[in-house]
Image (tube, grey):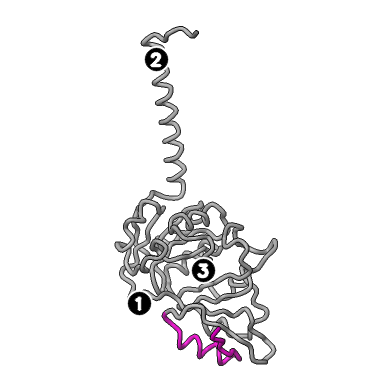
Amino acid sequence: LSKPRSPSQSLRLMRTAVGQWCCCCRHNAVHAAAAGSPGRVLRATNANAAEAARVLREGGVVAVPTDTIYGIAAHAGINDSVSRLWDLKGRPTTLPIAVAVHDVDAIARCARVEHLPQGLLHALLPGPVTVLLPRLEGKSAELASTLNPGVSTIGVRVPHDDFIRVVLAELKAPVALTSANASGASSTLAVDEFEHMWPNLDAVFDGGRIASGRSGSTIVDLTDAKADGTPWNFRVVRDGSALSPTVETVQKYGGVRSHE
C-alpha cells in the first residue's frame, strides 16, 4: 500500500494539476487567437481587407458582407478551416459549400471551364450568381479534400462586392463561402442578426445592412455547356435573387433550360 500523502505533498500535486490545466488553457487561447480575436467586429473597408486576408491565411473563419447576404468564409485550401464551417453552421456534410474567387479568370483555378461558350462567365459575373461547374482535380486544384468530398462539381461565385473582392485579391486563393446563419435558419442582412455566432468567429466584418432580399444568389448548373455553338441544357438549382437575367444570359449563349 502507498503511504498517505502529507498535506504539503497533496498541495504540491494539486498545484501541478492546476498548472497543467492552466498551461492547456493558455495553449488553447493562443491557438484560438492565432488567427484573430474571437468575436471582434471590424468595419468592412478596404483598409481592413488585408487583416481579413491575414486571418483567412492563418486558418481563421470570418464573417463578410456579399452582394446578396452575409456569409462566413474560410480558406478553401485548408482542411481544418473548411471543417470549421460545417461545425459552425451545423450543416450536414451532404450539402455542398460553394467557393468565391476575386475575378472570373480565377475560376479556372478550382473548376473546369474549357467546355463553356466564350464570354459566358464574363456575362454572368461578377454578380449574384453561383455557377455550378466540374470540379478541378489533381495537383493544380486549390481546394481542400474536406470541401464537399465525393462531389464532382463545385459552385463558384464572384460576388459584386468591393470588400470581399479586395480580400480575395489580397488572399490570392479561393474561400469556401456559406451564409452566416445556422443551417436551416433565415439568411442574414446585418451583423446583429447572427450575433450568436460571433464568439465562434475569428472576426466579423461589418458592411452595414445589405439592401437585398434574403434569397441569396441564383445557382445555375453549367456542367453540360458546349463551346461549339450547338444547343446545350442548363438547370437552375436555386432561383435566388437574379433568376430572370441569369436565364436570359445563358440562353443567349446557346443554353436550353431544363426543368428536371
CA distance separating discs 3 and 1? 20 Å
Q: Is residue 40 toward the left or the right of residue 248 in the image? A: left
Query: Is 177 colored magenta in this rendering?
Result: no
Which is nearer the eye, 213 or 202?
213
Residue drawn at (39%, 14%) of the image:
10
CA distance separating discs 2 and 3? 57 Å
Amino acid beneath label 2: Ser
Q: Residues within 10 Å of mark 1 (few under 14, many from 20)?
A: few
Badge 1 marks a residue whose secondary structure is: loop
Give the x, y percent position of residue 41: 34, 56
Which of the marked residues, 3 or 1, is nearer the chain's N terminus?
3
Give the x, y percent position of residue 12: 40, 16
Q: Residues within 10 Å of mark 3 (few under 14, many from 20)?
A: many
Residue drawn at (43%, 56%) of the image:
88
Which of the marked residues, 2 or 1, is nearer the chain's N terminus?
2
Q: Which residue is mark 3?
A: 100
Amino acid beneath label 1: Gly
Start and end of the magenta stretch? 241-260
Amino acid beneath label 3: Ala
Q: Which residue is mark 2?
A: 10
CA distance separating discs 2 and 1? 63 Å
Looking at the image, residue 78 lies above or below residue 122 = above
The label number, if any, that marks residue 161 in the structure image: none
